[in-house]
Amino acid sequence: MNQTRPPIDQRAPLLRMSHVEKTFRGNVVALRDMNLAVNQGDFVSLLGPSGCGKSTALRLISGLMSPTSGRIEWTGGQSKDDLGVVFQEPTLMPWARVVDNVWLPFRLRGVPYTDVKDDVLEALRLVGLEKFQRAFPRELSGGMKMRVSIARALVTKPRLILMDEPFAALDEITRHKLNNDLLALREQIGCTIIFVTHSVFESVFLSDRIVVMAARPGRVIREVQVTAPYPRDEEFRTSADYAAHCREASEALHDAMGEAA
Ligand SMILES: Nc1ncnc2c1ncn2[C@@H]1O[C@H](COP(=O)(O)OP(=O)(O)OP(=O)(O)O)[C@@H](O)[C@H]1O
C-alpha cells in the first residue's frame, strides 16, 4: 500500500524533546538543552561529529535511559508498540531461523507465531527476504542480515523506527542499495524514522530533515531541510540539487565541528 505524506510543515506531531539534558557519571554532559520535534511521516537524520550525543539522544527516545532533566513527550502517550530499533550490528540470534528472529518482538510479548505469521511474512516480503525465511543468519550476507534486522523493527508496525548507523559497516554498493530499499519501504508503509549517521551523503539522500548536532555539550545547532521530492533514486544521487544539499549539510557539519570545544 502506498502512503501519501502531507508536506513537511503540515504533519501531525509525534514526539517532542524539550530542553533535554543528559549527564553521565563523571560529569560528562552528553546532551544539553536538546530540542527536537518529530512529526508523523518525517525521515529525520541526526548528523554530527563523533561524541555529539546522537546515540544518547536515540537511547533517551527509546526509553533505555532517562534524561537528567527536560522532557520527552509522545503525542497520545507512549506504548510498548511505539518503537522499532535497528542498530549498527544486526544483533540477530544466530541459532534461530530468519522467521524466528523477526517474530522475536511478538514472542517477547507472549504472542504465538501462528497469531502473527502473516505480519512476520509481510515484514520479510517488504525487505525482499521472503524466500529466506527458513535460513539461519550465518547463511546470509551482511546486507541481508541488516534487512532481517529492519524487518524485525517494523514487524509490529511501530509509530517510530530508530536507526543507529545501520549501514555504517556495509560496503558502499550494499549501502546504496539498502538506502534505496529503505526509501521504497518507507513509501510502502509510511513509517516515521530517526536515523543516526556520520555521512552527509547518506543523510541528504534519505532524509527530509537533517538535524545537525555539535559536541561538548551535545546539542542541535542547525536543521537542513532536503526539499527534493520522493521517490529518490540514482538520478537524484547525481543531480545538482543533491550536490547543493550536500554542500549545505557539509557546511553545517563543518560549523558543528568548529563549535566543539
Ligand atoms: N554510558 C556512558 N557513560 C559515560 N559517558 C557516556 C556514556 N555513553 C555516552 N557517553 C559519552 O557521552 C558523549 C556522547 O556519546 P554518544 O555515544 O551519544 O555520541 P555519538 O554522537 O553517538 O558518537 P559516535 O558518532 O561516535 O557514535 C560522549 O562523550 C560519550 O563518551
Image: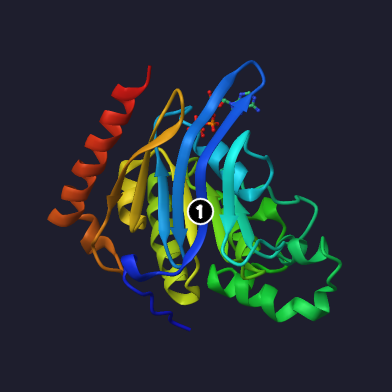
Image quarter for residue 179?
bottom left
Query: Where is residue 108, by image quadrant?
Result: bottom right
Residue at horizontal 54 percent and vertical 67 percent from the top: 127
Q: Which corner quadrant holds the C terminus?
A: top left
In front here: 36 or 200? Answer: 36
Label 1 sits on residue: 16
Asked whether residue 144 appears in the rendered view, the answer is no
Query: Between residues 213 and 157, which one lies in front from this camera angle?
Result: 213
Q: Residue at x 42, y 62 (%)?
A: 42
Image quarter of residue 35: top left
State the image coordinates of residue 77 (x, y, percent, origin top left).
Answer: 64, 63
- Which residue appears farthest toward the bottom when viewing the image? 1
Q: Nearer the viewer, residue 118 or 143?
A: 118
Colour style of the rendered protein structure: rainbow
Q: Residue 106 in the image: x percent, y percent?
A: 77, 67
Horizontal side of 81 relative to 249 (left or right) equals: right
Q: Amino acid at mark 1?
A: Arg
Is the residue marked 1 within 8 Å of ligand 1, measured from its CB? no
> Residue 76, can we see it?
yes
108 w.r.t. 23: above or below: below
Q: Residue at x 75, y 51 (%)?
A: 93
- The correct choice, above or below, for 33 with respect to 79 in the image is above
| The one of 13 and 107 positioned closer to us in this rendering | 13
Horizontally, residue 152 falls left or right of residue 174, namely right
Q: Position of residue 24 (x, y in %)?
A: 63, 24
Q: Residue at x 52, y 57 (%)?
A: 15
75 vs 260: above or below: below
Q: Secondary structure at mark 1?
A: strand
